[in-house]
Amino acid sequence: MPGFSDRPKLADRLKGRDNNLNLIRMIAAAAVLVSHAFPIALGDGAEEPLSRLTGMTLGAHAVMVFFILSGLLIARSFDRGGTLARFVLARAMRLFPALIVVLVLTIGLGAIFTKLPLADFFAAPQTLSYVPRNLTLAFLQPELPGVFEANPYPRSINGSLWTLFYEVVCYGSVVVIGLLGLLRARFLFTLTFMPVAAAFVFSTIWSPAGGLAYRLDLLATLGFPFALGMLAYVWRAALVLDLRIAALLWLLVLATAGSIVFAPAIVLAIGYSAIWLGFVPGGGGGCSRTTGWAIIPTGSTSTRSRFSNRWHT
């Protein structure tokens, strides 16, 4: 039985383009769809898969996967070199063209499903503001006039766009960390990572109702898996990819159930497992060149609430 030293390192696997990342993203996106189908069909407050078992919904698990892989790959992108302007342009081109297409198509589909006359629908202030408000990422508008108003979870469309704001904030953290040279300073980056982990633990017991505190809570929640992906990149030369390590991490999850470190243990196990599945058991079709996020027609405010309160019990 080979030892851990004989197993592949993440650095070796990152050199090529033969991986399973597209498959991992598709599975995660499907998990979000399944999870959000419950409140869409049954209304706000419907129990989503895994929420009772882990305190975190199936969709929240999937979002963790997205942010972990994003942290890993975005850190690599910045560290490969090039100008800051080129990095920012690359991120913008991955995000906004696809987002614009989705928002315009959503209005087109809204025109089919709206209960209003078409002239009233297109002239309504909510229709006119739908694209520009959602392009801000920070001041989202989930509803269109007359669309899905009688649904169990009414009016909200493309509610999953709320994660994009925090994704972009995390991109900004990569710029700061990269300019400080911490992507090539393993121990210094690890010291920087520790307060992020502490903030995440605190977020699991803090449940602000709204405002800036609510946004900071969500940033702590999503910033931790993103930073964990960055940590994996920084330690890529030493990070062994082995199924036995993944199994040990899931045993750690079981051992910490009910404790304050249960949530970080879950994210750590999810992150390592996603990276192992993404790079070890054979190649996929190459690194995805998509944005890495999914547009899901589900609730906005309530979805964020269910996500942010996943461990607040």
Image (tube, rainbow, N blue to C red):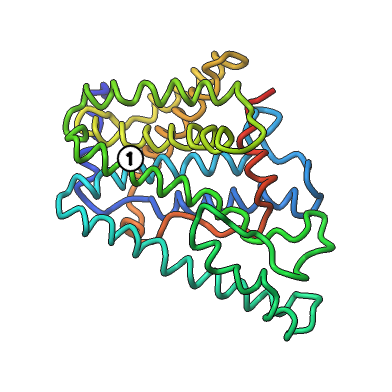
Side of 186 where 133 appears, left or right: right
Which corner quadrant of the image does residue 67 belong to? Answer: top left
Q: Looking at the figure, which quarter contains the N terminus?
A: top left
Q: Nearer the viewer, residue 134 or 193?
A: 134
Q: Amino acid at mark 1?
A: Ser
**Label 1: element kind:** helix
Residue 117 sits above or below residue 44 on the image? below
Q: Nearer the viewer, residue 28 or 136?
A: 136
Q: Nearer the viewer, residue 259 or 246?
A: 259
Which corner quadrant of the image does residue 134 belong to? Answer: bottom right
Q: Residues within 10 Å of mark 1 (few under 14, many from 20)?
A: some
Instruction: Please provide percent x and percent y for residue 125.
Output: 67, 72
Residue 89 sits above or below residue 229 on the image? below
**Residue in the image at 19% along x and 35% along y:** 180
Residue 114 sits above or below residue 99 on the image? below
Side of 53 where 102 appears, left or right: left
Q: Looking at the figure, which quarter contains the C terminus?
A: top right
Instruction: Please provide percent x and percent y for residue 212.
Output: 55, 37
**Residue in the image at 40% along x and 49% along y:** 168
Which corner quadrant of the image does residue 52 belong to? Answer: top right
**Residue in the image at 63% along x and 53% along y:** 33
Furthest residue toward bottom: 119
Q: Which residue is mark 1?
A: 173
Instruction: Please provide percent x and percent y for residue 7.
Output: 25, 30
